[in-house]
Amino acid sequence: MPDKTTAYRMFSIVNHIFLLVISLLCVLPIIHILAVSLSGKSPAAANLVGLWPIDFTFDAYKKTFGNDNFLHALFISAERTILGTFIGMALVFLAAYPLSKEQHTFRGRSVYAWYFIFTMLFSGGMVPGYILITKLHLLNSIWALILPGAVNVWLMILMLNFFRTVPKELEEAAMIDGASHYRILLSVFMPVSMPAVATLALFTMVGHWNSWFDGMLYMTNHANYPLATLLQTIVQQDYTKLNVRPEELENIAQRTVKSAQLFIGALPILTVYPFLQKYFVKGIVLGSVKE
């Protein structure tokens, strides 16, 4: 057996050590940020905090959750992520399902497919996009953050290829029972595609939650900033948009406030990922091999 050989065992040991090092490189910065956010002003300002808090305190979190601008930005990001993921995934499914059919089933399939691919390779640019959002009166609106990137062509292509792996016998059986294409999509393709759905949904959620530039571009009122955009201003030390008075920052170090807000900003995705991990792993490998 291959797994009994010395070479295989050595490879397995080296592989596990390599993956452990990569995992630590991903986890340790998060632990450090958490430790800084729970530390006092002096050790945080002096850069003495490592992986364990010094002068343990919740002052940074009290200040963060007492900031109306931060809580409002958190709500906007949550709203954007939920709406953006739902709308984006719905459009991806509706586009991927017909494009997964053969040419003789869906005439003109290649034309539509290349139309989508063209939009992935070429865009109008930042200035035309801003003019379009302005003309549509979407500035300072949640829809300015959702609609421009509602259809992710790359995710649509991944979903399209996954739909092609679904056995045609399932679709034919549903058609014999009189099911429409919408019923087939919802009752046949969606249940068997849950690993791919969870994987693409996770990509969409992370994209919306971490996106900051479009908030800075389309939100002229800083009160409408999503959380990622607000955190970007914090990193740039622009506290004028945080509604924090200078005397309030005398009691706590700016590093602790930044770290607390950065950790809170990363926490939702860190919380969701473990529930989607089993689907995420399956979604990566399923559809990659055809018989």
Image (cartoon, rainbow, N blue to C red):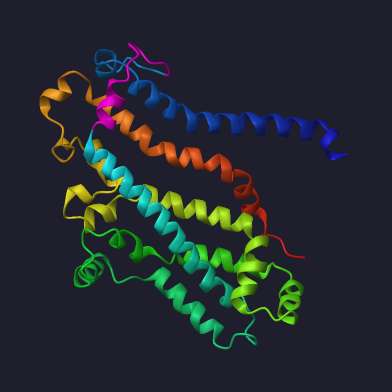
The quadrant of the rendering that contains the N terminus is top right
- Measured along the vertical axis of the image, is residue 62 above or below residue 172? above
Would residue 150 be found to the left or right of residue 27 on screen? left
User: In the image, is residue 52 part of the stretch drawn in magenta?
Assistant: yes
Residue 27 locus on image (x, y percent): 49, 30
- The residues colored magenta run 51-66
Q: Is residue 259 left or right of residue 154?
A: left
**For residue 140, which quarter of the picture?**
bottom left
Q: Nearer the viewer, residue 165 or 87?
A: 87
Position of 130 relative to 75 (above/below): below
**Residue 32: x %, y % from top left:** 40, 24
Question: Is 16 in front, or is 261?
Answer: 261
Q: Is residue 137 above or below residue 44?
A: below
View extreme (right): residue: 1
Measured along the vertical axis of the image, is residue 172 above or below residue 245?
Answer: below
Q: Quadrant of the rendered structure where residue 162 is?
A: bottom right
Q: Residue at x 66, y 31 (%)?
A: 16
Residue at left 28%, top 68%? 125
Total number of numbered discs in the rendering: 0
The magenta stretch spans residue 175: no
